[in-house]
Image (cartoon, coloured by chain):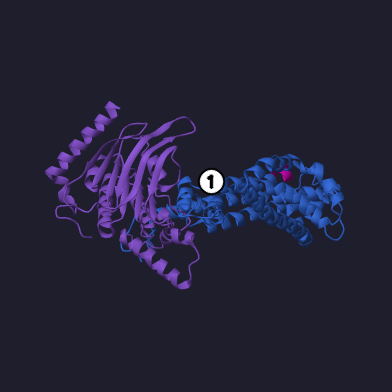
Amino acid sequence: MVSAVGEVEPPSPILELHGVTKRFASGLEALAGIDLGVARGEFLSVLGPSGCGKSTLLRIVAGLTPPSAGTCRLLLDNAPGRIGFVFQDPTLMPWSTVTNNVLLPFRIAGRAGGEERATQRERALAAVRAVGLGGFEDAYPHQLSGGMRMRVSIARALVTGPDLLLLDEPFAALDEITRLALNDDLLRLWERHRPTILFVTHSVFESVYLSTRIAVMSARPGRIVADLKVELPQPRGRVTRTSAGYAAMCDSVSARLAEAMGGA
Amino acid sequence: MMNRPIAGLPIAGRPTAGRQMMTSRLGLRIAAPLAIGILFLALWEAAVRVSGVPQYILPAPSAIARSLWTDGPSLLGSLWVTLQITLAALAAAAVIGGLIALVFSLSRIVEISLFPYAVILQVTPIVAIAPLIIIWIRVPFLALLTCAWIVAFFPIVSNTTVGLNSADRNLLALFRLYGASRGQVLWFLRMPTALPYFLAGLRISGGLALIGAVVAEFVAGTGGAETGLAFRILEAGYRLAIPRLFAALFLLSVTGIAIYLVLDFLSRRLLRNWHESAAGEAEE
């Protein structure tokens, strides 16, 4: 804990990617040599054009698909529930209520005694309230709007208290108003629990508004062409969107993105 | 419970225009076919009376009704025999068909190896193999049950197999992420996903089980103590008791409709909370 004057203690890494490459059986090369380190507590946006392999990168990090080459090292417990995943679609079980959907990670973990079961239920209900769905605990997905379903999906990802939260364009299918509201909700959740977030998006504004750091990816095969710190003050909110710094950052990120798409 | 109204959530206690429209539409659904039916019967009655067609060629609806009244009790007894075979066959089709689908979904190799034989069993005309089955299985009830089962099981197997393999890919990924076992994936994800498919198969199989039972009885032919409705139809045909034949046919169709309605009701009940086919009505 003791550090020399002027020296900042290096943040502890949670994820290290070295030369991660993904080639599909079809011959399609999705990722070409990704080097990326993520520190604990970071909110990192992976920004790139559609089809640049962003989602594939996320699936590799989650261990859902192996890289063709390179290494992906996660520095956290191997236990399930340390990683939360939110897909572009809410991906809910239509036959289960909101609460039961959120309880899924615990159900899978299984072997819970009566007392633990009650605690899990409490945590699920707390997660449902945390995403602003208090009162809808017993509703079924088909009774909810698209934005509310996405909130359920986020609650499910948060319920285990994950160290790493992977979000794969979670708000891309939502309308503007809902998306802005969910952006703010996500920021509040991140401020409160400080999980590490890996947020895949193709929206420049979203990435600048939300993240502490942005990795810009090129078109397929995806590689990281820029790694930018977002120095906008925390906590962020409506004021951020109208600040000069925000506009300047959006401008510079857009330029890098255009460069990546045109240059590559 | 709810602190704000949301779109799509039915608000209790407030009759809406939509709901009124729905009830009137429901009325129309019953009234319109009923009117057609009555008109048809009236025309039939009139045609028979005016033309003087003999009863053994085409009985008037009134004659059929009279036969239904006089032969009703004995016909109902026969119907009960046929119904027992039908329901037992349907139950066996649901259980065995469901299990076969489960095995298919667990092992691709088993599915590939056995599915063609299920198809063969399905496309073989039951009339052609029923005599063999009746010779092989000496207990008449079991023989008829087997015939009806062969006709009824396939829709359940094929539908449920598709259903078990239709689980959402992202949900499957999520289950893997949380370290779910194959059993958990099956129980928590594949089986609920397959439920609507299974129920759709069951609704088809309900009618097929009745047809299978009737066909098997036709082939088995023998009367004895346990005489099914199909044999009564044959017998009435031989004796030119055509009104009774029609009365038996009428009971048979009513039974088929009843089986369908019961299965339809069951499936709506089971799916009303979540499946689109059932949820659509609640949301209207």
The amino acid at mark 1 is: Ser
Q: Quadrant of residue A99?
A: bottom left
The residue at 31%/33% (across/down) is: A218
Q: Position of residue A13 (x, y in %)?
A: 31, 50
Q: Position of residue A112 (x, y in %)?
A: 48, 67
Span shown in magenta: B46-50
Q: Position of residue A208 (x, y in %)?
A: 22, 44
The residue at 39%/44% (across/down) is: A72
Please name whichever residue, B13 or B6, is drawn nearer the observer in this view of the structure: B6
Task: Determine if the magenta segment contains residue B276.
Answer: no
Q: How many marks?
A: 1
In the rendered image, is residue B243 in sight? no
Query: Which residue is label 1 attached to?
Result: B166
Is residue A245 left or right of A42 when viewed as pictured?
left
Question: Which quarter of the image is occupied by the N terminus of chain B?
Answer: bottom left
Q: Quadrant of residue A76?
A: bottom left
In the rendered image, is residue A188 in sight? yes
Task: Determine if the magenta segment contains residue B49.
Answer: yes
Q: Position of residue A35 (x, y in %)?
A: 33, 39
Among the chains, which one is purple? A
Pointer 1: residues within 10 angstroms few (<14), some, or many (20+)? some
Please name whichever residue, B92 or B51, is drawn nearer the observer in this view of the structure: B92
Among the chains, which one is blue? B
